[in-house]
Image (spheres, helix red, strand yellow):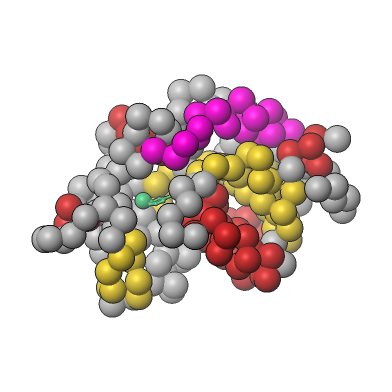
Amino acid sequence: MTTSLDLLPGDPRAALLVIDMQYDFMPGGALAVAEGDALVPLVNRLGAQFRNVVITQDWHPAGHISFASSHAGRSPFDSITLPYGAQTLWPDHCVQGTQGARLHADLVIDHAQLILRKGCNAGIDSYSAFVEADRSTQTGLAGYLKERGIDSVFVVGLALDFCVAWSALDARAAGFNTWVIEDACKAIDLNGSLDKAWQDLTAAGVVRIDSADVTR
Ligand code: VGL
Ligand code: ZN
């Protein structure tokens, strides 16, 4: 798709949001996303183009409420109802301080100024980099970006249908112009989650582009 951008990646008002490029989401990891590792070179190239880069890390305490192992009789990928709503259960992943929670070592965006850790509350998941799954606890990212004069956000990383989509939807809801760079993301695709993500993103006014639209 060809989309003319009304600002360039290097614009001080734009930020690249690099979502969860961690070993547990890479092939061989606890919650592997197919070909997640193949994104690293492209994400590095995109990172080099943006003046502002925020990197996120899924960062759960052991025994986190999103882990199937925290719920007797439940298996990964089951869905349960929590006080804040539906929650998909996952294999234990991105436990604080573990190798699986580390950013891929080949991800090199040295000028990134913020690494934001999310999902740190034991009883609340957070796919989104902006608002936790209770839909009220803020991570502070919207304020951080706004206070720095940033009004436009480009989202890449893992996984497209979970943390990328929720982050992009919340960026839009917080008033940012928001793009998802499709070829710089990979999806889990659980029970139609990828189609639903694109429907929700498009309906919210998030713009779907390719890296070529940014690099040209
Ligand atoms: C993610 C499931 C659970 C993601 C994080 O980064 O998309 N997905 N935790
Ligand atoms: Zn998680």
Query: Would you place residue 115 above or below residue 70 in this image?
Result: above
Q: Magenta region's main secondary structure?
A: helix
Residue farthest left in this picture:
72
Q: Is residue 206 magenta?
A: no
Q: Residue at x 41, y 31 (%)?
A: 27
Residue farthest front in this picture:
191
Q: Is residue 38 magenta?
A: yes
Query: Would you place residue 58 above or below residue 80 in this image?
Result: above
Is 212 or 141 nearer to us in this picture? 212
Q: Position of residue 139 (x, y in %)?
A: 46, 60
Q: Position of residue 170 (x, y in %)?
A: 57, 65
Q: Residue at x 51, y 47 (%)?
A: 187
Q: Position of residue 113 (x, y in %)?
A: 57, 39
Residue farthest top in this picture:
106
Q: Residue at x 74, y 33 (%)?
A: 49
In the image, the segment drawn in magenta is 32-49
Which image quadrant for residue 77?
bottom left
Q: Position of residue 8 (x, y in %)?
A: 83, 44
Q: How many marks?
A: 0
Q: Quadrant of the C terminus?
A: top right
Confirm whether residue 153 shows in the render: yes
Confirm whether residue 140 shows in the render: no
**Left or right of 88 in this view: 182:** right
Q: Residue at x 54, y 42 (%)?
A: 186
**Left or right of 67 in this view: 176:** right
